[in-house]
Image (cartoon, rainbow, N blue to C red):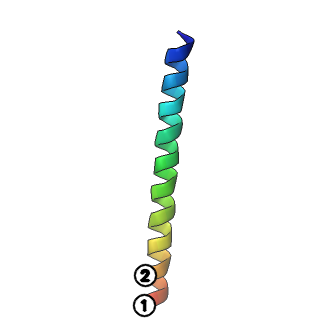
Amino acid sequence: MMTDIKKTANRVRAKLKGESCVNLNLSSVISAARWTR
């Protein structure tokens, strides 16, 4: 039971980390495009 909860928590944490990385990349790309223009 606890192992399932840990697995789910790890999966959610990894997903959140991935989404935050994508958001950081998007914001940096947008700022770079703004600066080049």
Image coordinates of residue 36 in percent, x first then y, are 44, 89
* Residue sticking out furthest to the front: 3
Q: Which residue is mark 1?
A: 37
Residue at screen point 52% across, 52% down: 20
Q: Is residue 5 left or right of residue 36?
A: right
Image coordinates of residue 31 in percent, x first then y, are 50, 77
Residue at screen point 55% across, 22% down: 6
Kindly identify which numbered label has been placed on residue 33: 2
Residue at screen point 53% across, 19% down: 5
The secondary structure type at the circle numbered 1 is loop
Residue 32 against residue 28 in the figure, above or below? below
Q: Amino acid at mark 1?
A: Arg
Image coordinates of residue 29 in percent, x first then y, are 44, 73
Residue at screen point 57% across, 13% down: 2
- Disc 2 to disc 1: CB gap under 8 Å: yes
Q: Is residue 9 left or right of residue 30?
A: right
Residue 34 against residue 22 in the figure, above or below? below
Q: Residues within 10 Å of mark 1 (few under 14, many from 20)?
A: few
Q: Amino acid at mark 2?
A: Ala
The secondary structure type at the circle numbered 2 is helix
Between 37 and 24, the one lying in front of the other is: 24
